[in-house]
Amino acid sequence: MSVVIGWDVGGAHLKAARAESGRITKAATYASPLRAGTERLLQAFAEAQMEMGRADRNVVTMTGELADTFSSRREGVEHLAMLAARELDAVSIYAGPAGCVRPEDAHEHVTDIASANWHACATLVARKRDDALFIDLGSTTTDVIPIVGGKVVARGYTDWQRLAASELVYTGIVRGFVMATARCAPLRGAWTPLINENFASMADVHRILGTLPAGVDLMITADGREKTIAASRARLARMLGSDASDASDETWTLVARWFAEAQTRAIADAVTLVLSSATLASPPSIYAAGIGFSLIAEIARRLGCTYSTFDELLDVVPDARAAVCHCAPAAALASLSSS
């Protein structure tokens, strides 16, 4: 039996997926915020290896090179590549169109390696479907990638290119900033500008609405307090210069709905723009991944697209399907590297 583990090293989470003879048997996410350094990432690697077990091959992609722990993306790529080489056996680094490279050669492929996790997913989708739109809505960002004729036809590759093309949208279910989701919100009959402080996150919004998937919020809250609906109301109220006691619970639920709708519209706008630049079959087929894949189902409904989840493209044990959607880049690498 051949075992491959795919790894996705993000700025806030480490994700891993184990494939045994091509079948995904495990997938999991570990908190590993890089902003304070790499110590927590090292702990996450140790935790993950205990759960994932040994592998004949480990394949790594990353977005963590953007963390401000590193002075540049180049430094981040080189550092994370060599850290993975120290922590794992038989390691290769995913470099997008350049394929997989040795960690010691990462410095020669910085642009190909940096934030290429989306490309691994899109490549897998393109191998399985001729025409599709891949959307990965995670804790921090959303990827919107068109596949036409069995090829990835994204207009951008680097982060800045993808941001300009709306193929990368900086909004996520957990770590998205409320103040970056809308400029104002309705409160007491007035459009109230937001305070530009990180008082609340989109996890608070979705917690209030009951749309935050279980087990996905692994980060500390903005104020360091508990992860309850009442505490989330308090944090959201502060964004509007208020206390939760200044209005009813129903009012704060309405405010939360406003932010959730603003997030949905922002992603739907990006999807519409990407669809306008790619000649996809009508109606286009969306394949959804990430912890926010249920929100993508709503966007697909609004835009008249067919909807499927990313795990349907893979051979996955039944009880790992949701985790595979949450860890799509790691699962894609494990599958691609097993074929």
Image (cartoon, rainbow, N blue to C red):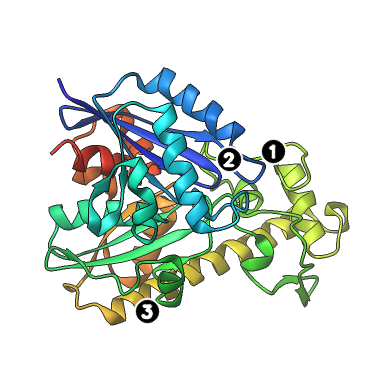
Mark 1 vs mark 2, foreground winner is 2
Q: Amino acid at mark 1?
A: Lys
Q: Residue at x 23, y 51 (%)?
A: 99
Residue for badge 1: 227
Foreground of the two, 110 or 134 = 110
* Residue 277 located left or right of residue 111: left
Can residue 155 be seen in this snapshot? yes
**Residues at badges 1 and 2 in contact (C-beta under 8 Å)?**
yes
Which mark is first along the chain, 2 or 1?
2
Which mark is first along the chain, 1 or 3?
1
As drawn, the residue found furthest toward the bottom would be 276
Q: Amino acid at mark 2?
A: Asp
Residue 273 bears which disc, if any?
A: 3
Q: Residue at x 61, y 67 (%)?
A: 181
Which mark is first along the chain, 2 or 3?
2
Quadrant where the C terminus lies?
top left
In this view, 189 is above or below 45: below
* Residue 251 located left or right of residue 313: right
Q: Amino acid at mark 3?
A: Leu
**Where residue 162 appears, x then y in whole percent?**
40, 70
User: For numbered disc 1, what is the local secondary structure?
Assistant: loop
Q: Residue at x 44, y 60 (%)?
A: 142
Residue for badge 2: 217
